[in-house]
Image (cartoon, helix red, strand yellow):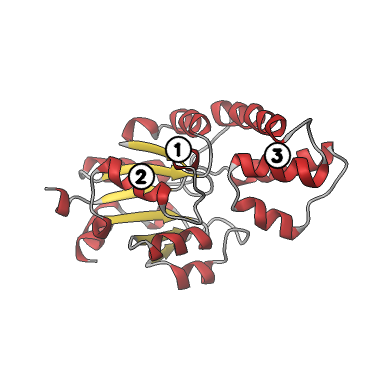
Amino acid sequence: MQGKTIGAIFDCDGTLLDSMGVWREMESEFAHRAGGELTEADRDLLTTLTTPEAGRFFHEKFGLGASADDVVSMVNEYMLNYYSTRSVARSGALSFVRGLSELGVRLSVASSSPVAFLRAGLEHTGFLSLLDAVVSVDDVGKPKREPAVYERARSLMGTDTAMTWGFEDAVYAIGTLKRAGFHALAVYDCDESGTFEELSAAADETVRSFLELDAGEFVKLARSA
């Protein structure tokens, strides 16, 4: 019965995958190619942008590429290579997600990254076969500052909002989930996405690692929330 089915929507970068560093690596590399340097404000902004928005940012601020679309192509090439060959899961993440799958929890990924990156990285690290849906902000045309990507993932899983939890590492995304009526569990990654204290203030539950989570205990929590 749909109303009793638990859903879990996972962010990808910085949550399931230990991949935030490569995005920072790529951003610094692109700024360097253009002879520029990113400020802390630039990095904070880039964390919230979709790939087309990031392409426009680098083209307009640094003059990188012949156009914003040209920069997007550069991003795609750089990142697809990473996800296909170098991506790694965060400690304990695969075991936790597999445990949820075995307990009948519906599972999805909602991310700001393009679907091609997501599927490559999730397949490389072993998550893809466990998921009911993989959704990108590109599919809904709206960033994670709005709930559309989470709503699409929830709809594809077939779960009710009240029984669906979002797993995120970014404070702003936790805020989006909560405003839309979802439960939110924060998995701390780095202070760039939000300090542990900031995440704790915004989310229903907060952990520093998936190693702190147990699938059975999470299901009990979700049913009682």
User: Residue 7: x, y in percent?
Assistant: 27, 49
Q: Which mark is residue 9?
A: none
Q: Residue at x 68, y 46 (%)?
A: 24
Residue occupying the far left of the picture: 1
The amino acid marked with disc number 2 is: Arg
**Where does label 1 land, which residue?**
139
Q: Which mark is residue 152?
A: 2
Q: Is residue 94 visible?
A: yes
- Label 2's element? helix
**Where does label 3 land, which residue?**
26
- Label 3's element? helix
Q: Earlier in the sequence, mark 2 or mark 1?
A: 1
Q: Residue at x 57, y 63 (%)?
A: 194
Residue situated in front as seen by the camera: 109 or 221: 109
- Number of other residues with Cα within 10 Å of mark 1, as a class: few under 14, some 14 to 19, many 20 or more: some
Q: Earlier in the sequence, mark 3 or mark 2?
A: 3
Foreground tag (3 vs 1): 1
Q: Is residue 99 visible?
A: no
Residue situated in front as seen by the camera: 112 or 52: 52
Where is residue 80, by image quadrant?
Answer: top right
Asked whether the residues under the numbered discs 2 and 1 touch, taking CB atoms below 8 Å apart as contact, a structural biologist would say yes
Left or right, 40 with respect to 143, comes to right
User: Residue 83: x, y in percent?
Assistant: 56, 31
User: Residue 66: x, y in percent?
Assistant: 79, 30
Measure the alpha-carbon separation of dots 3 and 2: 29 Å
